[in-house]
Image (cartoon, rainbow, N blue to C red):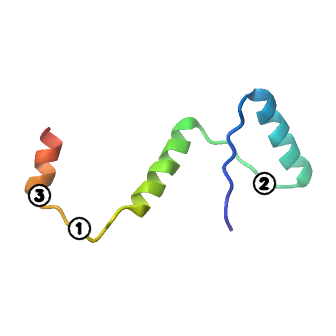
Amino acid sequence: MKALVVTPKNSHEFRFVTNLLKKLGVGSSTVTQEELEDIGMSKLMRKVDKTKKASRAEIMKKLSA
């Protein structure tokens, strides 16, 4: 099953959407801004090219910069 992320503009719109979903019998949950950022980071990580390999030296160089 797919999920839908909706970002309301203000608290009034948030209440409207949550009430509408409740009336329709659609399950919903609220996520924090941090959780939303984690979801975005997860999507980016899944899209990254996993065929290229980096040496330990390259990684350590990037980390020390």
Counting residues from the N terminus, which is met first, the one under dot 1 or under dot 2? Answer: 2
In this rendering, the answer to whether 34 lies above or below 44 is: above
User: Which element carries disc 1, helix, strand or loop?
Assistant: loop
Q: Which residue is mark 2?
A: 27
Q: Is residue 42 left or right of residue 63?
A: right
Q: Position of residue 4 (x, y in %)?
A: 69, 54
Residue at screen point 36% across, 61% down: 48
Toward the viewer: 30 or 52? 52
Q: Are there few (<14), some (14-19), or many (20+) residues within 10 Å of tag 2?
A: few
Q: Amino acid at mark 3?
A: Arg
Query: Is the residue under label 2 in contact with that under label 1 (CB below 8 Å)?
Result: no
Mark toward the viewer: 1 or 2: 1
Residue at screen point 66% across, 49% down: 5
Mark toward the viewer: 2 or 3: 3
Q: Which residue is mark 3?
A: 56
Q: Is residue 8 left or right of residue 47?
A: right
Q: Amino acid at mark 2?
A: Gly
Gap in Å between the C-alphas at discs 2 and 3? 46 Å
Q: Amino acid at mark 1?
A: Lys
Gap in Å between the C-alphas at discs 1 and 2? 40 Å
Q: Position of residue 62 (x, y in %)?
A: 16, 45
What label sits on residue 9 in the rendered view? Answer: none
Mark toward the viewer: 3 or 1: 1
Q: Are there few (<14), some (14-19), or many (20+) residues within 10 Å of tag 1?
A: few
If the image is split into quadrants, where does the C terminus sit? top left
In this rendering, the answer to whether 2 lies above or below 19 is: below
Q: Which residue is mark 1?
A: 52
User: Which element carries disc 3, helix, strand or loop?
Assistant: helix
Counting residues from the N terminus, which is met first, the one under dot 2 or under dot 3? Answer: 2
